[in-house]
Structures are given as C-alpha cells and as structure tokens.
Amino acid sequence: MPAKLEGKAVTAPPRPTRTVPVALSTLAEAAGARLIATTDGTTVTGATLRAQHVRPGDLFAALPGARAHGADFAADGIAAGAAAVLTDEAGAARPAVRDAGVPVLVHPDPRAVLGPLAAIIYGHPSRHLDVLGVTGTSGKTTTSYMVESGLAAAGRTTGMIGTVETRIAGERLASAFTTPEAPDLQALFAVMVERGVTHVAMEVSSHALALGRVAGTSFAIGAFTNLSQDHLDFHPDLEDYFAAKRLLFDGRSAREVVCVDGEWGRRLVTPDTVTVSTTGAAHWTTSDAHTSLSGEQSFLLHTPDKQVIPATLPMPGTFNIANAVLAAAILAESGVPVETIVRGLSTVRVPGRMERVDVGQDFTAVVDYSHKPEAVALALDAIRARADGKVIVVLGCGGDRDTAKRPLMGEAAARRSDLLVVTDDNPRSEDPAAIRAAMLAGARAVPAAERGEVVEIGDRRQAIIAAVAKAEKGDVVVVAGKGHETGQEIAGVVHPFSDRDELAAAIRGMSS
C-alpha cells in the first residue's frame, strides 16, 4: 500500500484546461490493441492510472501490479466518468471491467503503451518543448537545478520536473516521484505548453525508464551523470540498472551529453555524443578548481571551441563541478551563450544538496540528500577537506530499499567522521532497528583507528539534537540522507519531518 500523508490528502496532478477529443479507435490502432467496443464513436480527453483521479472522458489505465490489479478499481474509475479502460487480458476478464459497459482496449503490456497513448491524447506536448532529461545515480537533481538556473539567466520560460519539486513557469508543485507516471507526465507537459514554457529541465530515473513513464516523450537532450550502487531492490544487478539508464540514449533523445569520468559513461559514447569530464579528455572539461572557506568553488570551464571561461559555484564538492560542466554542456546544446551559462551557475541554489543551515552558530551545519554509499563518501570527503574541527554525521538508511548498501553507507560515514550517529531515515514497512543494525555492522567493521566514535539513536530528532550538542566552534554537523524531504515514512504513514527545520531548531535550542 502507498504511504498516507498524515493529515493531508494527496492532490491530483495538474491537467491542461482543454484537450481535443481523440477517437478510441485511433488509440487502438496506435497501440496495436484489441478494442472491445460497447458503443461506436467513443472519444477520450484525458488519461490516468489512478481511479481517484479520473475525470469525465478519461481513459482509465487498469494496470497489473505486484499487489493488486488496477482492474479491481475500474468500477470507481468508471463511476467517476471514465469513458474507456486500457488493460491486459487478465484485467479485461475481471467483472469490474468485463461488465462495466464501457469500451475496453486490451493490450498484452498496457504499461508500455500508456505513455504513447497519453502523448496522443494530450497532443504530443513534448514535441512543443525542449525537454532536457538528466539520468544517472547521483547529481540528477543538482544538474537539473543548474540547467534551470542557466535557462532562467537566458530569459527562457522554464519548467522543472524532479525529486524536490515540479515547477511550471515559476509555480511550485510538490513531487511524488522523481519522474511522474506516464499520463501525469504528458498532462504536465501539456500544462507547460499552455503556460508558455519553452524548456524543461527534467530528472529521469531508472524506474521511469524501465516502467515506461517517459515513453511517448520526445527529449531534445538526454544527459548522463554517473552510475554507482543504488536501487538494487528494483534492479537485480548493476548491469540491469545501467541498461535502464541506457534507454534514455536509445534514440529518443535528439542530442546526447555524457559525463565520461566513469566507465559507465564511457560505454554510452557514440561519434555524436557530446562528452564532459573533470579528469580527462572530453569536449567540455575543467581545470584549476579551488574551494573557499565558505564552500564556494571557482574553476575554469574549457569549451569545445577552446574558450577558457572563469566560473564560480556556490556549493562545495568536486562532484558538483562535474555536475556543473555537464549542465554547461546541456545549456550550450540548448543555445545558451557560455557567458550566460556561468552567470546562471554562480547563482544556483539546490534545496537539500550540501545546503547550509545558519542561525548564527559558530560551527557549520549542513543538510545533504546523500543516501548512497558513493554519495555519502563524496559529500563527506568534500566537507572533511575544508573542516577545521570535528565532522559529526547523522545518517540513516531507508526501508524497503536496497539492503546491500546499508553496511556500505555505515562504513563510508564511519571512515570520514569523528562522530557518527546512526539513526532512522524512512523505515517504511521495515523494523527500524534492523536497518540500523546493518548500518552499525558496516560502521563497526572499520578498525577503530580508522574511524570515529559510532553511536545509535533511533529517533531522528533526538539524533540531530545529540549531534548538535557535541558541536563546538569550527566543527561541521552533517545531517544526511533526507535532504529536501519534509516527511518521514514510518509503517505506512508519512509524518511531517524536515532535516533543515529540525537542525535549525536543535541549534537554537542550544542557547535557550
């Protein structure tokens, strides 16, 4: 069951104000689906796979799932006004669909055709936008914000779709997924077209690619950051994970931009690929990186036409320079002048990514979304490099996710901290103590001489308070794992919780 948001109802995603009705027979032909027609001339004006979000005239997609079949909710969708149902043979045989009295499109893999059908229903909106898709394990969010900042500096009307938020010409919407479900995504693109958006910076997750959420989307640019261990609860191994990421480069992107600092990126390169690197040869490279005491970085950006442009970035970490050069290449491919690109980079702000919390204390406090072993290591290496005092880390691991990364995250944090407080993240349906035990095993496997103190405090609020209580002048407190998130999911309920707010409150409490 999906988590419930404590005290709040989940709102339906936005829809365009107007769509042109599309004949169901047209959709059947486009999908190669069998049409069971109870009436002639049926048209549809929208699409959804959630019965509670059905509007009159919708195509309701009743998809097979791991725990239930969407056909079991078809009666609710039809009662809300669904004009037709898209499902598979098993769904079509369910009484709720078979006896519903509305036309049914039957396809052996309805999820695979849902995106293209939704694109048809909403008038192929991505063809009227420059969709700039970013995939990879780490850096998708940061790179997307950098791209959006550069586009804004160039005066473009922008959209953004990602983990932290969705934005339409400046209006902010909360994000339920890194990449929305296929019909919601196509509707969102259609809304953006209506509101005059020209360019969309978009995170593209492996789940979205593997599950067809971006099917039917035309990408002006597909970009790749990096690949490391993550989501092995969904993918059987790294090769399968990479194969999903690789789908963004199967021809659906008109142009491709790839970071080649790792072997995974180098495997994506074709003669037409625009390459970027911070460590070797590529079309776009960097040099002479320096980090100030405030964490701001300066570097030289080397362009394909041999220009060398000074650039600044208001966030630490060499990995963020890699994100910046990738964003620069994406922006250049979108027609943004390099001088405008560096101006956009200099003002970028990314919620929950190496984000400082400053309420006047004499130590540094940082919230970061790092929730993968490599991301934890990179973030703490960046912080350790500029820390004058102790590095104090609060870290947990999410439940119902890749279990193999838990000891690795514990080890990575223990090696790089003077004090590691192992706590809860989003335990979801799992026993929080078991998750912490796996992290502690990894942390305590590090020889004592090679790590700092390791303690366990399950309650995340109390863990943050304890970390802050240990902080002295010149120290750095890092609360990692949840970043921008404003809830903590425990046993199927999402309770309000913000690392940024809790960290600020703990600091204020020191002097009260």
Image (cartoon, rainbow, N blue to C red):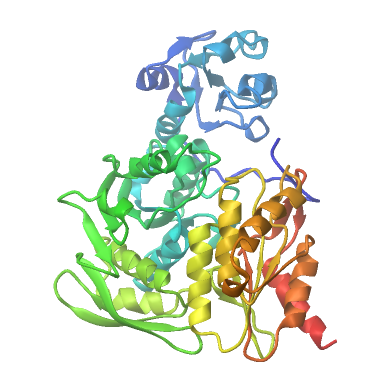
- Check the image and report above or below for 88 versus 259: above
Q: Residue 196's x, y, as percent? A: 42, 56
- Check the image and report above or below for 389 versus 84: below
In the visual, does 98 lie left or right of 169?
A: right
Quadrant (top left, top right, bottom left, bottom right) of the C terminus:
bottom right
Q: Residue 188's x, y, as percent? A: 49, 46
Q: Residue 192's x, y, as percent? A: 45, 51
Residue plotted at (71% across, 50% down): 427
What count of labels does the image hold?
A: 0
In the visual, does 177 lie left or right of 153?
A: right
| Image-quadrant location for residue 289 | bottom left
- Check the image and report above or below for 376 versus 58: below
Viewer-closest of 394 and 207 = 394
In the visual, does 499 lie left or right of 155?
A: right
Residue plotted at (26% across, 53% down): 266
Q: Residue 439's x, y, as percent? A: 65, 56
Q: Is residue 482 visible?
A: no
Quadrant (top left, top right, bottom left, bottom right) of the N terminus:
top right
Q: Residue furthest right?
A: 512
| Image-quadrant location for residue 52 | top right
Residue plotted at (56% across, 24% down): 63
Viewer-closest of 299 and 411 = 411
Residue plotted at (46% across, 80% down): 314
| Image-quadrant location for residue 262 | bottom left
Q: Is residue 372 visible?
A: yes
